[in-house]
Amino acid sequence: MGSLWTEEFFPKNFEEFIGNSEVVENSVKWARSWQDGKPQKPLLLFGAPGTGKTCLVYLLASHFKWSVFEMNSSDSRDKDSIERTASAAAMNSSLSGERRLVLFDEIDCILSDDRGGIGAILSVLKEAKNPVILTANDLYSDKKLAPLREYCEKAEFKKINYLSIAKRLREILSLKGVEFDEEAVKELAKNSSGDFRAALLDSQSLALSGKIGKKDIELFSGREREEKIFSVLSKVFFGKTSDEIRRAVFYSDVNQDLLMRWVEENIPRQFRGEDIAQAFNRLSRADVFSGRIMRRQHYGFMKYTGDLLTLGVNSAKTTSTHSFNPFTFPTLLSKLSRSSAERETRKSASLKIGRKTHASVRKTSVESMPFLPVILGDKQKAALFFAEFDFSAQEAGFLVGAKHDSKKVENLLAEAEKIKAERLVQKNKKAFPAIAQEDFSESQTRLF
Protein backbone atom coordinates (compact mmCIF):
# COMPACT_ATOMS: atom_id res chain seq x y z
CA MET A 1 0.00 0.00 0.00
CA GLY A 2 3.04 2.26 -0.06
CA SER A 3 2.17 3.90 -3.41
CA LEU A 4 -1.07 5.04 -4.94
CA TRP A 5 -2.72 2.45 -7.13
CA THR A 6 -3.39 5.14 -9.75
CA GLU A 7 0.38 5.32 -10.13
CA GLU A 8 1.14 1.62 -9.67
CA PHE A 9 -1.47 0.51 -12.22
CA PHE A 10 -0.99 3.31 -14.73
CA PRO A 11 -1.71 1.75 -18.17
CA LYS A 12 1.41 0.30 -19.79
CA ASN A 13 -0.23 0.23 -23.21
CA PHE A 14 -3.43 1.28 -24.98
CA GLU A 15 -5.01 -2.15 -24.40
CA GLU A 16 -5.01 -1.49 -20.63
CA PHE A 17 -6.75 1.88 -21.03
CA ILE A 18 -10.33 1.73 -19.70
CA GLY A 19 -13.22 3.12 -21.77
CA ASN A 20 -13.53 5.68 -24.61
CA SER A 21 -11.91 3.33 -27.13
CA GLU A 22 -12.91 5.47 -30.12
CA VAL A 23 -11.26 8.57 -28.64
CA VAL A 24 -8.12 6.56 -27.91
CA GLU A 25 -8.00 5.22 -31.46
CA ASN A 26 -8.40 8.69 -33.00
CA SER A 27 -5.81 10.17 -30.63
CA VAL A 28 -3.27 7.52 -31.63
CA LYS A 29 -3.88 8.35 -35.31
CA TRP A 30 -3.41 12.04 -34.52
CA ALA A 31 -0.13 11.37 -32.71
CA ARG A 32 1.13 9.02 -35.42
CA SER A 33 0.60 11.75 -38.03
CA TRP A 34 2.82 14.07 -35.99
CA GLN A 35 5.39 11.30 -35.67
CA ASP A 36 5.38 10.88 -39.45
CA GLY A 37 6.05 14.59 -39.93
CA LYS A 38 2.46 15.63 -40.70
CA PRO A 39 1.48 18.48 -38.33
CA GLN A 40 -2.08 18.35 -36.96
CA LYS A 41 -4.41 20.82 -35.27
CA PRO A 42 -4.13 20.94 -31.46
CA LEU A 43 -6.18 18.23 -29.77
CA LEU A 44 -8.72 19.28 -27.13
CA LEU A 45 -9.86 16.48 -24.80
CA PHE A 46 -12.86 17.28 -22.61
CA GLY A 47 -15.14 15.38 -20.28
CA ALA A 48 -15.82 14.40 -16.66
CA PRO A 49 -12.92 14.07 -14.18
CA GLY A 50 -11.38 10.63 -13.74
CA THR A 51 -12.18 9.39 -17.26
CA GLY A 52 -8.54 9.31 -18.39
CA LYS A 53 -7.85 12.54 -20.28
CA THR A 54 -4.45 13.31 -18.73
CA CYS A 55 -3.67 9.60 -18.51
CA LEU A 56 -4.09 9.27 -22.28
CA VAL A 57 -1.76 12.22 -22.88
CA TYR A 58 1.07 10.62 -20.91
CA LEU A 59 0.37 7.24 -22.48
CA LEU A 60 0.72 8.78 -25.95
CA ALA A 61 3.97 10.47 -24.94
CA SER A 62 5.34 7.21 -23.56
CA HIS A 63 4.32 5.23 -26.66
CA PHE A 64 5.92 7.68 -29.12
CA LYS A 65 8.85 8.48 -26.81
CA TRP A 66 8.03 12.17 -26.54
CA SER A 67 8.93 14.34 -23.56
CA VAL A 68 6.05 16.24 -21.96
CA PHE A 69 5.87 19.90 -21.04
CA GLU A 70 2.83 20.45 -18.83
CA MET A 71 1.15 23.68 -17.82
CA ASN A 72 -1.75 23.37 -15.41
CA SER A 73 -3.90 25.48 -13.11
CA SER A 74 -1.14 25.69 -10.51
CA ASP A 75 1.26 27.50 -12.85
CA SER A 76 1.53 31.19 -13.58
CA ARG A 77 -1.12 31.92 -16.20
CA ASP A 78 -0.48 35.48 -17.25
CA LYS A 79 0.49 36.39 -20.80
CA ASP A 80 4.23 36.79 -20.15
CA SER A 81 4.59 33.48 -18.28
CA ILE A 82 2.78 31.49 -20.96
CA GLU A 83 4.75 33.09 -23.80
CA ARG A 84 8.05 32.59 -21.99
CA THR A 85 7.57 28.92 -21.06
CA ALA A 86 4.90 27.19 -23.13
CA SER A 87 5.77 28.99 -26.36
CA ALA A 88 9.41 27.91 -26.14
CA ALA A 89 8.37 24.32 -25.45
CA ALA A 90 5.95 24.28 -28.39
CA MET A 91 8.54 25.64 -30.82
CA ASN A 92 11.60 23.58 -29.87
CA SER A 93 12.41 19.90 -29.54
CA SER A 94 13.74 18.33 -26.34
CA LEU A 95 17.44 18.07 -25.50
CA SER A 96 17.47 14.52 -26.88
CA GLY A 97 16.16 15.74 -30.22
CA GLU A 98 12.79 14.02 -29.81
CA ARG A 99 9.50 15.80 -30.20
CA ARG A 100 8.05 17.54 -27.16
CA LEU A 101 4.36 17.16 -26.35
CA VAL A 102 2.90 20.36 -24.85
CA LEU A 103 0.00 19.80 -22.44
CA PHE A 104 -2.34 22.52 -21.19
CA ASP A 105 -4.10 20.53 -18.45
CA GLU A 106 -7.53 21.65 -17.19
CA ILE A 107 -7.59 24.67 -19.50
CA ASP A 108 -10.93 25.75 -18.03
CA CYS A 109 -9.18 26.20 -14.66
CA ILE A 110 -6.07 27.83 -16.13
CA LEU A 111 -8.22 30.56 -17.65
CA SER A 112 -10.57 30.97 -14.67
CA ASP A 113 -8.57 34.06 -13.66
CA ASP A 114 -7.50 35.22 -17.11
CA ARG A 115 -4.78 37.86 -17.27
CA GLY A 116 -4.12 37.87 -20.98
CA GLY A 117 -3.49 34.11 -20.98
CA ILE A 118 -6.13 33.25 -23.57
CA GLY A 119 -4.40 35.30 -26.27
CA ALA A 120 -1.01 33.86 -25.37
CA ILE A 121 -2.32 30.28 -25.56
CA LEU A 122 -3.90 30.94 -28.95
CA SER A 123 -0.56 32.24 -30.20
CA VAL A 124 1.15 29.07 -28.96
CA LEU A 125 -1.44 26.90 -30.73
CA LYS A 126 -1.03 28.75 -34.04
CA GLU A 127 2.78 28.79 -34.03
CA ALA A 128 3.46 25.36 -32.45
CA LYS A 129 5.94 23.08 -34.22
CA ASN A 130 5.26 20.31 -31.71
CA PRO A 131 2.04 18.43 -30.86
CA VAL A 132 -0.21 20.28 -28.39
CA ILE A 133 -3.02 18.77 -26.31
CA LEU A 134 -5.46 20.64 -24.09
CA THR A 135 -7.78 19.07 -21.52
CA ALA A 136 -10.91 20.49 -19.90
CA ASN A 137 -13.63 19.23 -17.58
CA ASP A 138 -16.35 21.60 -18.79
CA LEU A 139 -15.66 22.95 -22.25
CA TYR A 140 -18.79 25.06 -22.59
CA SER A 141 -18.98 26.69 -19.15
CA ASP A 142 -16.98 29.79 -20.09
CA LYS A 143 -17.36 31.97 -23.19
CA LYS A 144 -13.64 32.74 -23.03
CA LEU A 145 -12.99 29.17 -24.22
CA ALA A 146 -14.85 29.75 -27.49
CA PRO A 147 -11.70 30.69 -29.52
CA LEU A 148 -9.98 27.51 -28.34
CA ARG A 149 -13.01 25.38 -29.23
CA GLU A 150 -12.97 26.78 -32.73
CA TYR A 151 -9.27 26.30 -33.31
CA CYS A 152 -8.79 22.78 -31.91
CA GLU A 153 -9.82 19.28 -32.91
CA LYS A 154 -12.20 18.19 -30.13
CA ALA A 155 -12.71 14.75 -28.56
CA GLU A 156 -15.22 14.12 -25.77
CA PHE A 157 -14.54 11.62 -22.99
CA LYS A 158 -17.70 9.86 -21.85
CA LYS A 159 -18.17 8.45 -18.37
CA ILE A 160 -16.78 4.91 -18.18
CA ASN A 161 -19.26 2.04 -18.04
CA TYR A 162 -19.40 0.63 -14.52
CA LEU A 163 -19.00 -2.96 -15.77
CA SER A 164 -15.65 -2.05 -17.35
CA ILE A 165 -14.59 -0.38 -14.11
CA ALA A 166 -15.66 -3.40 -12.04
CA LYS A 167 -13.76 -5.79 -14.30
CA ARG A 168 -10.53 -3.82 -13.96
CA LEU A 169 -10.97 -3.42 -10.20
CA ARG A 170 -11.33 -7.19 -9.78
CA GLU A 171 -8.11 -7.73 -11.75
CA ILE A 172 -6.22 -5.23 -9.59
CA LEU A 173 -7.59 -6.56 -6.28
CA SER A 174 -6.63 -10.09 -7.31
CA LEU A 175 -3.10 -8.94 -8.15
CA LYS A 176 -2.83 -7.24 -4.74
CA GLY A 177 -4.14 -10.35 -2.95
CA VAL A 178 -7.17 -8.55 -1.49
CA GLU A 179 -10.30 -10.58 -0.76
CA PHE A 180 -13.46 -9.05 -2.17
CA ASP A 181 -17.15 -9.67 -2.65
CA GLU A 182 -18.17 -9.63 -6.34
CA GLU A 183 -21.32 -7.62 -5.68
CA ALA A 184 -19.42 -5.18 -3.46
CA VAL A 185 -16.95 -4.40 -6.25
CA LYS A 186 -19.80 -3.95 -8.71
CA GLU A 187 -21.51 -1.54 -6.30
CA LEU A 188 -18.24 0.34 -5.82
CA ALA A 189 -17.97 0.75 -9.59
CA LYS A 190 -21.55 2.04 -9.80
CA ASN A 191 -20.96 4.57 -7.04
CA SER A 192 -17.98 6.00 -8.93
CA SER A 193 -20.31 7.57 -11.52
CA GLY A 194 -17.95 6.66 -14.34
CA ASP A 195 -14.87 8.01 -12.54
CA PHE A 196 -12.33 5.16 -12.65
CA ARG A 197 -9.70 7.12 -10.72
CA ALA A 198 -12.13 7.65 -7.82
CA ALA A 199 -13.14 3.97 -7.88
CA LEU A 200 -9.49 2.88 -7.79
CA LEU A 201 -8.65 5.18 -4.88
CA ASP A 202 -11.74 4.04 -2.98
CA SER A 203 -10.68 0.42 -3.55
CA GLN A 204 -7.22 1.14 -2.16
CA SER A 205 -8.71 2.78 0.92
CA LEU A 206 -11.08 -0.14 1.55
CA ALA A 207 -8.32 -2.69 0.91
CA LEU A 208 -6.44 -1.44 3.98
CA SER A 209 -8.65 -3.76 6.05
CA GLY A 210 -7.62 -6.73 3.89
CA LYS A 211 -11.10 -7.43 2.52
CA ILE A 212 -13.82 -5.55 0.64
CA GLY A 213 -17.39 -6.49 1.55
CA LYS A 214 -20.85 -5.01 1.13
CA LYS A 215 -20.76 -3.29 4.52
CA ASP A 216 -17.59 -1.46 3.50
CA ILE A 217 -19.24 -0.12 0.35
CA GLU A 218 -22.09 1.38 2.35
CA LEU A 219 -19.59 3.78 3.91
CA PHE A 220 -18.81 5.20 0.47
CA SER A 221 -22.32 5.33 -1.03
CA GLY A 222 -23.93 8.71 -1.35
CA ARG A 223 -20.67 10.54 -0.78
CA GLU A 224 -20.11 13.88 -2.52
CA ARG A 225 -17.42 13.55 -5.18
CA GLU A 226 -17.10 17.16 -6.37
CA GLU A 227 -13.93 17.67 -4.34
CA LYS A 228 -11.82 14.54 -4.03
CA ILE A 229 -8.53 14.29 -2.20
CA PHE A 230 -6.46 14.95 -5.33
CA SER A 231 -8.27 18.14 -6.23
CA VAL A 232 -8.01 19.30 -2.61
CA LEU A 233 -4.27 18.59 -2.52
CA SER A 234 -3.83 20.33 -5.85
CA LYS A 235 -5.40 23.48 -4.41
CA VAL A 236 -3.43 23.23 -1.16
CA PHE A 237 -0.11 23.00 -2.98
CA PHE A 238 -0.77 25.05 -6.11
CA GLY A 239 -3.84 27.24 -5.53
CA LYS A 240 -3.38 30.92 -6.35
CA THR A 241 -5.83 32.57 -3.97
CA SER A 242 -6.86 31.97 -0.38
CA ASP A 243 -10.51 31.83 -1.43
CA GLU A 244 -10.07 28.93 -3.85
CA ILE A 245 -7.97 26.98 -1.32
CA ARG A 246 -10.46 27.47 1.51
CA ARG A 247 -13.36 26.64 -0.78
CA ALA A 248 -11.75 23.40 -1.96
CA VAL A 249 -11.14 22.24 1.62
CA PHE A 250 -14.57 23.37 2.85
CA TYR A 251 -16.49 21.43 0.19
CA SER A 252 -14.37 18.28 0.46
CA ASP A 253 -15.14 15.22 2.58
CA VAL A 254 -11.57 14.93 3.89
CA ASN A 255 -11.19 15.40 7.64
CA GLN A 256 -8.42 17.64 8.92
CA ASP A 257 -6.28 14.88 10.46
CA LEU A 258 -6.29 12.85 7.25
CA LEU A 259 -5.51 15.92 5.14
CA MET A 260 -2.54 16.66 7.42
CA ARG A 261 -1.14 13.18 6.76
CA TRP A 262 -1.50 13.66 2.98
CA VAL A 263 0.14 17.10 3.06
CA GLU A 264 2.97 15.83 5.27
CA GLU A 265 3.72 12.99 2.88
CA ASN A 266 3.69 15.11 -0.28
CA ILE A 267 5.58 18.25 0.74
CA PRO A 268 8.99 16.75 -0.28
CA ARG A 269 7.52 15.63 -3.62
CA GLN A 270 5.97 18.95 -4.58
CA PHE A 271 8.42 21.48 -3.08
CA ARG A 272 12.16 22.02 -3.48
CA GLY A 273 15.02 23.32 -1.32
CA GLU A 274 14.19 25.88 1.35
CA ASP A 275 10.51 25.70 0.45
CA ILE A 276 10.35 22.22 2.04
CA ALA A 277 11.69 23.54 5.36
CA GLN A 278 9.25 26.45 5.36
CA ALA A 279 6.30 24.19 4.53
CA PHE A 280 7.16 21.72 7.31
CA ASN A 281 7.61 24.60 9.75
CA ARG A 282 4.06 25.77 9.08
CA LEU A 283 2.71 22.23 9.16
CA SER A 284 4.35 21.73 12.56
CA ARG A 285 2.61 24.87 13.85
CA ALA A 286 -0.69 23.41 12.65
CA ASP A 287 0.10 20.26 14.62
CA VAL A 288 0.85 22.34 17.74
CA PHE A 289 -2.61 23.91 17.57
CA SER A 290 -4.16 20.45 17.05
CA GLY A 291 -2.52 19.37 20.30
CA ARG A 292 -3.88 22.42 22.09
CA ILE A 293 -7.36 21.61 20.85
CA MET A 294 -7.13 18.12 22.35
CA ARG A 295 -5.64 19.27 25.67
CA ARG A 296 -7.82 22.32 26.24
CA GLN A 297 -10.93 21.25 24.31
CA HIS A 298 -10.89 24.71 22.76
CA TYR A 299 -12.11 24.19 19.20
CA GLY A 300 -11.67 27.84 18.31
CA PHE A 301 -8.08 26.89 17.48
CA MET A 302 -9.30 24.85 14.50
CA LYS A 303 -9.25 27.94 12.27
CA TYR A 304 -5.52 28.33 12.98
CA THR A 305 -4.86 24.65 12.33
CA GLY A 306 -6.80 24.75 9.07
CA ASP A 307 -5.13 27.90 7.73
CA LEU A 308 -1.60 26.84 8.69
CA LEU A 309 -2.16 23.41 7.16
CA THR A 310 -3.42 24.80 3.85
CA LEU A 311 -2.66 28.49 3.27
CA GLY A 312 0.54 28.33 5.32
CA VAL A 313 1.93 25.37 3.37
CA ASN A 314 0.81 26.89 0.05
CA SER A 315 2.57 30.21 0.73
CA ALA A 316 5.86 28.42 1.45
CA LYS A 317 6.35 27.72 -2.25
CA THR A 318 8.56 30.29 -3.96
CA THR A 319 9.58 28.41 -7.11
CA SER A 320 7.50 26.71 -9.81
CA THR A 321 8.31 23.40 -11.51
CA HIS A 322 6.82 21.81 -14.59
CA SER A 323 7.66 18.21 -13.74
CA PHE A 324 4.95 15.60 -13.17
CA ASN A 325 5.00 14.54 -9.50
CA PRO A 326 1.93 12.46 -8.60
CA PHE A 327 0.62 12.65 -5.05
CA THR A 328 1.66 9.74 -2.83
CA PHE A 329 -0.46 7.82 -0.34
CA PRO A 330 0.61 8.61 3.25
CA THR A 331 3.31 6.16 4.37
CA LEU A 332 2.19 6.41 7.99
CA LEU A 333 -1.28 5.10 7.13
CA SER A 334 0.25 2.24 5.15
CA LYS A 335 2.49 1.26 8.07
CA LEU A 336 -0.39 1.45 10.53
CA SER A 337 -2.47 -0.73 8.25
CA ARG A 338 0.28 -3.36 7.93
CA SER A 339 0.93 -3.38 11.68
CA SER A 340 -2.71 -3.33 12.82
CA ALA A 341 -2.82 -7.11 13.45
CA GLU A 342 0.46 -6.97 15.39
CA ARG A 343 -0.78 -4.06 17.53
CA GLU A 344 -4.01 -5.89 18.31
CA THR A 345 -2.05 -9.01 19.35
CA ARG A 346 0.25 -6.93 21.54
CA LYS A 347 -2.76 -5.29 23.19
CA SER A 348 -4.56 -8.58 23.90
CA ALA A 349 -1.39 -10.17 25.34
CA SER A 350 -0.79 -7.09 27.51
CA LEU A 351 -4.37 -7.28 28.77
CA LYS A 352 -3.92 -10.89 29.92
CA ILE A 353 -0.62 -10.14 31.65
CA GLY A 354 -2.00 -6.95 33.22
CA ARG A 355 -4.95 -8.77 34.80
CA LYS A 356 -2.62 -10.96 36.87
CA THR A 357 0.03 -8.33 37.56
CA HIS A 358 -2.54 -5.64 38.41
CA ALA A 359 -1.19 -3.27 35.76
CA SER A 360 -2.83 -1.32 32.93
CA VAL A 361 -2.54 -2.42 29.32
CA ARG A 362 -0.41 0.61 28.51
CA LYS A 363 1.98 0.08 31.43
CA THR A 364 2.35 -3.60 30.61
CA SER A 365 2.95 -2.88 26.94
CA VAL A 366 5.48 -0.10 27.55
CA GLU A 367 7.29 -1.27 30.70
CA SER A 368 7.01 -5.07 30.76
CA MET A 369 6.98 -6.15 27.12
CA PRO A 370 10.57 -5.01 26.34
CA PHE A 371 11.95 -7.42 29.00
CA LEU A 372 9.94 -10.48 27.98
CA PRO A 373 12.32 -11.61 25.17
CA VAL A 374 15.04 -12.07 27.85
CA ILE A 375 12.76 -14.28 29.95
CA LEU A 376 11.26 -16.19 27.05
CA GLY A 377 14.65 -16.91 25.50
CA ASP A 378 14.90 -19.82 27.96
CA LYS A 379 12.60 -22.66 26.85
CA GLN A 380 11.83 -23.85 30.38
CA LYS A 381 11.06 -20.35 31.64
CA ALA A 382 8.95 -19.66 28.55
CA ALA A 383 6.84 -22.77 29.20
CA LEU A 384 6.37 -21.76 32.86
CA PHE A 385 5.42 -18.24 31.78
CA PHE A 386 2.87 -19.47 29.23
CA ALA A 387 1.40 -21.80 31.86
CA GLU A 388 0.46 -18.73 33.92
CA PHE A 389 -1.58 -17.12 31.13
CA ASP A 390 -4.15 -18.36 28.66
CA PHE A 391 -2.28 -17.15 25.55
CA SER A 392 -3.51 -17.96 22.07
CA ALA A 393 -1.07 -19.28 19.47
CA GLN A 394 -1.06 -15.81 17.85
CA GLU A 395 -0.11 -14.13 21.13
CA ALA A 396 2.49 -16.76 22.00
CA GLY A 397 4.09 -16.39 18.57
CA PHE A 398 4.24 -12.62 18.98
CA LEU A 399 5.91 -12.90 22.40
CA VAL A 400 8.65 -15.28 21.28
CA GLY A 401 9.09 -13.71 17.82
CA ALA A 402 7.90 -16.70 15.80
CA LYS A 403 4.99 -17.56 13.55
CA HIS A 404 1.86 -18.69 15.38
CA ASP A 405 1.86 -22.03 13.54
CA SER A 406 5.58 -22.74 13.96
CA LYS A 407 6.90 -25.85 15.71
CA LYS A 408 8.51 -23.67 18.38
CA VAL A 409 5.19 -22.15 19.44
CA GLU A 410 3.41 -25.48 19.22
CA ASN A 411 5.97 -27.16 21.51
CA LEU A 412 5.95 -24.29 24.04
CA LEU A 413 2.17 -24.31 24.28
CA ALA A 414 2.13 -28.11 24.61
CA GLU A 415 4.71 -27.91 27.41
CA ALA A 416 2.66 -25.18 29.12
CA GLU A 417 -0.43 -27.42 28.99
CA LYS A 418 1.53 -30.23 30.67
CA ILE A 419 2.61 -27.87 33.46
CA LYS A 420 -0.99 -26.71 33.96
CA ALA A 421 -2.18 -30.35 34.07
CA GLU A 422 0.44 -31.27 36.67
CA ARG A 423 -0.54 -28.25 38.79
CA LEU A 424 -4.19 -29.30 38.58
CA VAL A 425 -3.29 -32.81 39.77
CA GLN A 426 -1.36 -31.42 42.73
CA LYS A 427 -4.21 -29.05 43.61
CA ASN A 428 -6.80 -31.80 43.58
CA LYS A 429 -4.60 -34.18 45.56
CA LYS A 430 -4.55 -31.61 48.34
CA ALA A 431 -8.32 -31.20 48.11
CA PHE A 432 -8.92 -34.99 48.12
CA PRO A 433 -6.03 -36.58 50.13
CA ALA A 434 -7.84 -39.95 50.47
CA ILE A 435 -7.73 -40.51 46.73
CA ALA A 436 -4.69 -42.48 45.72
CA GLN A 437 -2.47 -40.87 43.13
CA GLU A 438 -2.75 -43.78 40.71
CA ASP A 439 -6.56 -43.67 40.84
CA PHE A 440 -6.84 -39.89 40.65
CA SER A 441 -7.90 -39.59 37.04
CA GLU A 442 -10.65 -42.19 37.34
CA SER A 443 -11.89 -40.76 40.64
CA GLN A 444 -11.88 -37.24 39.22
CA THR A 445 -14.13 -38.43 36.39
CA ARG A 446 -16.62 -39.91 38.88
CA LEU A 447 -16.63 -36.85 41.09
CA PHE A 448 -17.18 -34.32 38.36
Image (tube, grey):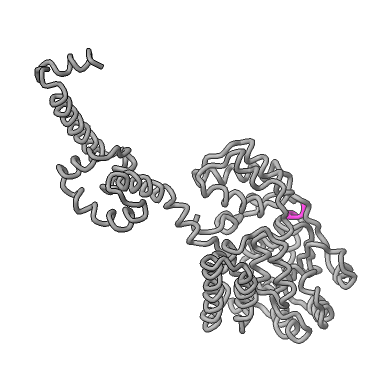
Query: Among all residues in the image, which is located at the extreme top?
Result: 446
Judge left or right: residue 287 versus residue 39.
left
When asked about the image quadrant of residue 391, the answer is top left
Judge left or right: residue 161 versus residue 274.
right
Query: Picture coordinates of residue 139 (x, y %)?
Result: 84, 64
Judge left or right: residue 344 versus residue 120.
left
> Which corner quadrant holds the C terminus?
top left
Q: Is residue 67 visible?
A: no
Main SS class of the magenta portion in the image? helix
Query: Picture coordinates of residue 290 (x, y %)?
Result: 55, 69
- Residue at 56% across / 68% down in the picture? 293
Query: Picture coordinates of residue 151 (x, y %)?
Result: 86, 70
Closer to the camera in the image, 99 or 151: 151
| Magenta stretch contains residue 22 | yes
| Magenta stretch contains residue 311 | no
Q: Is residue 11 visible?
A: yes
- Residue range highlighted in magenta: 21-25
Closer to the camera in the image, 111 or 267: 267
Residue 271 against residue 397 in the figure, above or below? below
Query: Picture coordinates of residue 205 (x, y %)?
Result: 57, 52
- Residue at 12% across / 17% down in the picture? 435
Total number of numbered labels? 0
Residue 9 against residue 395 in the figure, above or below? below
